[in-house]
Amino acid sequence: MNYNLKNKPDMSFWNLWNLSFGFFGVQIAYALQSANITRIFATLGADPHSLSYFWILPPLMGIIVQPIVGTLSDKTWTRFGRRIPYLFIGAACSVLVMCLLPNAGSFGMAVSTAMIFGLVALMFLDTSINMAMQPFKMLVGDMVNEKQKGLAYSIQSFLCNAGSVAGFIFPFVFTAIGISNKAPKGIVPDSVIWSFYIGAAILILCVIYTTIKVKEWNPQDYAAYNGLSKPLNEEKVNIIHLLKKAPATFWQVGLVQFFCWAAFMYMWTYTNGAIAATCWGVDMSLADAAKTSDYQVAGNWVGILYAVQALGSVAWAVVLPRFKNRKFAYALSLVLGGIGFATVPLFSNQYMQFVPFLLIGCAWAAILAMPFAMVTNALQGRGHMGVYLGLFNGTICVPQIVAALLGGIILGLVGSVQTNMMVVAGVLLFLGAASVFFIRETKTQEVEA
């Protein structure tokens, strides 16, 4: 049976909003993980040279889970939809694990056992977050026409950054309203624990909203709207074959992604130590440095800096579409982010750190928007959007895994000073900016930009 290509209908603003609203809750969970994993494991007693190894699990789970979710959801059809069942199951699992992870040090276990418990919880948390996150990207690719795709991804980017801001500032806010930011040795403070509890509640409420409001197409309609010869649930998928057929843009953008995500991996791993040392004078070479009250105060402030980064990302996202040359805008954003990372060691005043993190936000805005816009445009009409986006997630996960494996070695090479890892991150973004100019887009893509 052949399906003639039908034009995807325009959607109202609020229908586009509903497609991505659950992403707000998912991003709160992701922000809490990003800002607090190093803090949690350092509080439990992890050595600074080993911190990056704890970050291997999140991208490892992503590279395994997201292609599986993409492949299975391409072929799934239930009364609840294709993508939404995976979204809901992932969110439900995230809620459970978010209530367990920050309590790793609270169950009376030995330090080594508490770390193993935390690692297992982190593995399940990132698996479930990835399972919940990927469907939102697919929903936009599935149901939004090219004319509205820019608006749809802008809405998703706004909700992503809004969720990030909320998740990042929770520990600071909860400390300000009287929840304790201090705890016995080896135990995570209540300000962090309650941040995870509240984040879990918001996550499940947001995902329930999207589940109720969004009605997906059936496989036949999807095939008709995407010009496929048969519904995807009737096709066999050979991932190796699909990779061989992937457009050159897929791989060229992937090179840029390598440098960008390695840089941000080092930000998430070492910012807590860098800010504690630079702004609070904590000697991070001491064995118990991460268990001091100043380190916990710095940990709260890192959440504020990440929120500043997210706000900078929102502001820069408004500016990006004004550039006529998309590649120039992409490269410029990464250069600004590189300058931001490289200048973190220069500011001992905690408020002056807003400047570098605003610049880092410029890079983050481009990393969130540019790669998926370029790749989804290059994939238009090929089908298997879910599988391809799942595979493209490898360009996010692989560099993080490589960076995590090398983190302790590089830290040793730069004098075991965590602040110097910010400079390393800056150099990586400069390399990413240079790699942008290897990307070759089609004329159609350039017009759409």
Image (cartoon, helix red, strand yellow):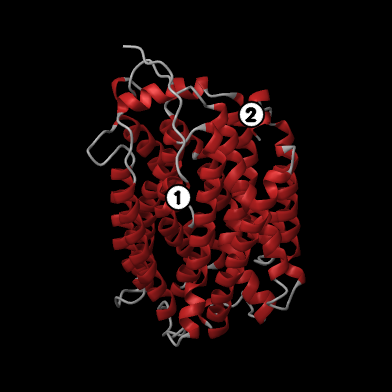
- Taking the image as drawn, is residue 247 in sight? yes
Disc 2 packing (10 Å; few <14; some 14–19; many ≥20): some
Residue 432 versus residue 49: which sits nearer the camera? Answer: 432
- Residue 22 located left or right of residue 1: right
Look at the image and tell me in which quarter the C terminus lies: top right
Q: Is residue 420 above or below residue 181?
A: above
Residue 294 relative to residue 440: left or right: left
Does 433 appear above or below 238?
Answer: below
Label 2, on which residue?
A: 445
Instruction: Kindly identify the residue that appears in the image at 42 percent across and 31 percent down.
Output: 387
Where disc 2 sits, the SS reads: helix
Residue appearing at x 70%, y 38% in the figure: 326
Q: Quadrant of the N terminus?
A: top left
Q: Residue at x 61, y 69 (%)?
A: 305
Position of residue 149 in the picture relative to residue 421 (left or right): left
Task: Give the residue at mark 1.
Answer: 17
Most distant residue in the top direction: 1
Helix, strand or loop status at disc 1? helix
* Earlier-in-chain disc, 2 versus 1: 1
Please state the horizontal and vertical placement of residue 180, each as a whole percent of the image: 43, 86
Give coordinates of residue 82: x percent, y percent. Answer: 31, 37
Kind of residue at badge 1: Trp
Residue 175 on image: x %, y %: 48, 83
Q: Is residue 416 left or right of residue 226?
A: right
Q: Residues within 10 Å of mark 1 (few under 14, many from 20)?
A: many
Res. 75 image quadrant: top left
* Total marks placed: 2
- Compute the Cα span from label 2 to label 1: 24 Å
